[in-house]
Amino acid sequence: LSLSLTACGGGQQGGDQQKQEGANPPAAGNVRTIRAGIGLNDQHPQFKGLEKFKEIVERDTNGSIVVENYHSGQLGDDRAMMEALQLGTQEMTCPSTAPIANFVPGFSVFDIPFLFPNEEVADQVLLKDPVGQELLDMLPEQGMVGLAYWENGFRDLTNNKHEVKTVADFKDLKIRTMENKLHLAAFRALGANPTPMAFSELFTAMQQGTVNGQENPIATIYLQKYNEVQKYLSLTHHVYSPFVLLLSKKFWDESTPEEQEIMKKAAQEAGDYERKLVREANGEYVDDLKAAGMTVTEITEADRAEMKKVTDAVLPQFVDTIGKDIVDKVTTAVENASK
Ligand code: TF8
């Protein structure tokens, strides 16, 4: 019975006319499993957030939905996992918005360098302004449902060649970026030599010198032990990366309205918890990275403004792809939240 229910599921395309409410509610006693996979390791707050999600969902559905969490790319990299969600062969993942932009280009609005001045403004735009939900609403036609924003965080630059303080210092650094066109263009504009690469290949690439550097939030740099292969850390804060907790549309459509409500609420609660853990640990992680021998460089406001000027120049070529409407709504929301 459970097999036939799964096989009859609504299909991954948004165009099908099946009503969500009636779509294949689980038979009594039928347990369905969410396999959730992420690229980061189990020490990262993101994994602890998934554990929280599991706890809430299993409790509130009385075990009709079971959650199995996988870390360190055990189920594949971001792109492979999103494709598996579209096919309905995996149920959940939690990528940064930058790789999601390859599926829904509007999410690239968050790739605009130096868009958010601080975490409070990011929270306001993502969690309170309607544009946050408007972007999530674009996911179902790609076979995915965005349950909530979580936090990867402000991205900082590491490398093993020399200290990076100013725009001039990016020159000749081979930097791994996420698979995202705006990131590539921004680092090229800064004078670096960027190369896109899946996260799972990054550590080895740094170790073997295929790339000189990378950029990720402090928690990732510390918990993935990048200090073992990188000497210099610059607190550039050049991009704020949200995570989105994604569920396959197939699993969503096969859930009852009650289960959908439980998953949505659990995603938000676990996200609040995850955000709190990320923020609490940041300061400590910077100290630990210094103690581990990294040279940590603060960026002056003047140098950051110079970097922004350089990266702003590449934005016009991306406005049409992102959607002018989305760019305007997000920049207005940032302005309002910054007042
Ligand atoms: C990256 C991202 C990653 C996440 C994660 C692996 O650099 O920042 O942390 O997308 O899913 O690839």
Image (cartoon, grey):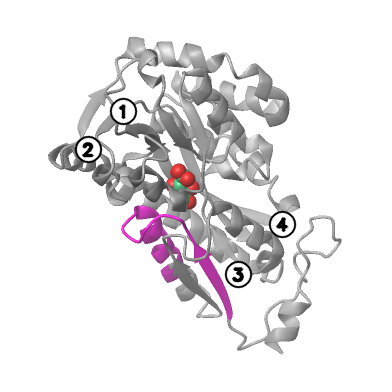
Residue at image position (53%, 75%) is 61
Relative image position of residue 164 (x, y in whole percent): 31, 22
| Amino acid type, label 4 | Gly
Relative image position of residue 312 (x, y in whole percent): 54, 16
Examine the rendered structure and indicate whether residue 63 appears above or below residue 71. below
| Amino acid type, label 3 | Glu
Labels 1 & 2 near each other (Cβ < 8 A): yes
Depth check: give the residue in front, 12 or 267: 12
Labels 1 & 3 near each other (Cβ < 8 A): no
Q: Compare marks 2 and 3 and give the one earlier in the sequence.
A: 3
Where residue 286 is drawn, which disc sits there?
A: 2
The C terminus, quarter of image: top left
Where residue 235 is drawn, which disc sits there?
A: 1
Q: CA distance from mark 3 to mark 4?
A: 18 Å
Q: Nearer the viewer, mark 1 or mark 3?
A: 1
| Amino acid type, label 1 | Leu
Q: Which residues are magenta?
A: 32-55
> Which residue does the numbered mark 4 point to in the structure image?
143
